[in-house]
Amino acid sequence: MRYSRYIKEILILVIMILFSLTIVDNFRSVKELKISLEQTKENLYQTNQVISAMQKEMYESSFAFSQNGE
């Protein structure tokens, strides 16, 4: 009877340790995802800036062409 109680307590302790490790791993994963999200936002912003500059250049060149072509 005593041994079954000890085994039960040891099992509960092992389960709690495993859950704790899982929680720590999940926190690490969330932190990595946040970093990845920030990098993706920065890449998207830089891409938007490049596209904006290209559109401006295309507009200015076509506007200049239409003025000179007339």
Image (tube, rainbow, N blue to C red):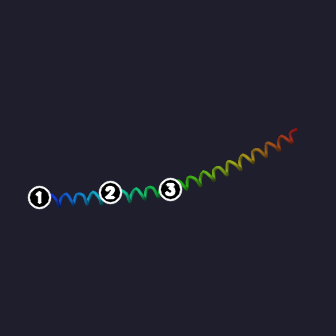
Q: Is residue 54 left or right of residue 5?
A: right
Residue toward you, 50 or 1: 1
Pick the quarter of the image with the N terminus: bottom left
Label 1, secondary structure: give it.
Answer: loop
Residue toward you, 67 or 34: 34
Amino acid type at image mark 1: Met
Could you classify mark 1 by the number of other residues whose Cα lies within 10 Å: few (under 14), some (14-19), or many (20 or more)? few
Amino acid type at image mark 2: Phe
Pick the quarter of the image with the C terminus: top right
Q: CA distance from mark 3 to mark 2?
A: 23 Å
Q: Position of residue 63 (x, y in %)?
A: 81, 43
Circles 3 and 2: CB atoms closer than 8 Å:
no
Amino acid type at image mark 3: Lys
The residue sitting at 24% across, 58% down in the picture is 12
Label 3, secondary structure: give it.
Answer: helix
Q: Is residue 4 left or right of residue 22?
A: left
Q: Position of residue 29 (x, y in %)?
A: 43, 56
Q: Nearer the viewer, mark 1 or mark 2?
A: 1
Check disc 3 and report the residue beneath it: 34
Check disc 1 and report the residue beneath it: 1
Depicted 9 relative to depicted 53: above or below: below
* Total residue callouts: 3
Q: Residue furthest top?
A: 70
Q: Nearer the viewer, mark 3 or mark 2?
A: 2
Question: Image quarter for residue 5?
Answer: bottom left
The residue sitting at 60% across, 51% down in the picture is 44
Q: Residue furthest left?
A: 1
The answer to which of marks 3 and 2 sits earlier in the sequence is: 2
Label 2, secondary structure: give it.
Answer: helix
Q: Position of residue 35 (x, y in %)?
A: 51, 57
Q: Which mark is residue 19?
A: 2
